[in-house]
Amino acid sequence: MLQVDRTCLANFDLELYMSGLSNNLLMSQEEINNFNKKINNTVSLSSFKSTLSKEELEKLIFQNNYYFPLYIDSIYYEHQNFDNKIVVKDQNIIKYAITLKRVNIRTFPTLERASYSPNDSRFDQFQETTFEINEPVLVITEDKSGKWAFIQGRDYNGWTLKKDIAFFHNKEEFIKYIKSLKSNFITTISSKSRLMFDTGEFQDINMGTKFIIKEKEPINGFLRVIVPIKDSFGMIKFTTGSISTSDVVYKFLPYTRKNVIIQAFKMLNEPYGWGGENGFHDCSSFIQDIFKTFGFTFPRNADAQEMLPGTRFSFKNLDYDERLQLIKNLKPISLLFMKDHVMLYLGFIDNSPYVINDITAYYQNGILVRDYKVAVTDIINARRSDSKSFLESLTTAIEIP
């Protein structure tokens, strides 16, 4: 758990800070696309194998299994009988689908929660992540009840409820849709955007979600977009929805330092959500969704993000003064890493280095106070549970570019 001293949550003059930021373009979209090609922790859905052997499927599915104590009534079922609850053939044909809403990605095909301790209800260890609506996925297999599907997304895999996805008729249709999502689309840029269906229903969606444009000209301040739904057989069909022009941008935002900071501060004070629960973010999905709005395809977890290409700086074997000097030389919007955590660097302000990050708790007068939100943090005064400051805990910094 990330623990932050209350003194680090000081007043931060955002307007003054923003006035000193450059709005010059840092990378073109072509340069960002080339950067994405260097990322090793993502999956190409279009070129994924059409079938998996029994051994390949089992390796993929069981990679997230837990072999340490977790507090859950049905833990015996999850660990001892899980193998018998899924469909595994000698040759397993891959199916192609899309998400119809924000879906939870689970370690096991169950909605039951698990934690490291009986009182640790906020951190469900079976909650891996979430996929937003309109996310193309591969369906690797199902459980024997037919209620759950094991899906592979661009940056993660796990179990989700089958009712929340729709199937394409074939791979060609799937690839065609992916190509359309790369050519004629809008991206949501608000912390939360409301997608209105013609039926009057709606979904609130997170930053960085893409939709194919139905009509380029807005009507009364709203853009019409193509939205996936399913027929009575579970196959994909499409309807139209509307989304406010103030919540979207055509394709992607220009990648500038000022724009990155603007996107980050749209989520200031948003509640923390482990594994994306309740539509919120944890530390790494906070970073991932910010950079989605510029066209970056970061991996999901902090440890994988720490392997991103870019200009890398290691804090290994550096003393306190050397760490401080390295931080002083970093450019704003660099990514800072320590064990199990990633932060967005803001710069030196009033002789202190600041970040914006999604935190869980902090100490106040020696007492643990649980905060759980996106906050601005002074990394000299912020301390972890081992009493080390964030500055002393840093492992890596990455500048992009």
Image (cartoon, rainbow, N blue to C red):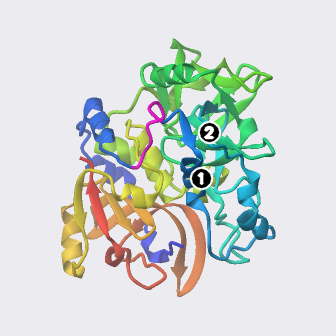
Horizontal arrangement in the rendering, residue 79 relative to residue 222 (left or right): right
CA separation, marks 1 and 2?
11 Å
Q: Secondary structure at mark 2?
A: strand
> Is residue 113 on the magenta stretch?
no
Residue 270 location (% of width, % of height): 57, 54
At a point 43% along the width and 59% down the height, the residue shown is 302
Which amino acid, mark 2? Asn
The residue identified by callout 1 is 58
Residue 108 location (% of width, % of height): 68, 56
At a point 18% along the width and 76% down the height, the residue shown is 322
Q: Which residues, given as a range, are shown in magenta?
A: 41-48
**In the image shown, does 92 or 181 lie closer to the viewer?**
92
**In the image shown, does 314 or 3 lie closer to the viewer?**
314
Which amino acid, mark 1? Glu
Q: Is residue 20 above or below residue 350?
A: above
**In the image shown, does 324 or 282 lie closer to the viewer?**
282
Is residue 393 at all visible to an observer of this figure?
Answer: yes
The residue identified by callout 2 is 92
> Is residue 42 on the magenta stretch?
yes
Query: Label 2 crowding class (10 Å Cα cut-off): few <14, some 14-19, many 20+?
Result: some
- Where on the picture, by quarter, is residue 295? top left
Residue 127 location (% of width, % of height): 64, 57
Q: Secondary structure at mark 1?
A: helix
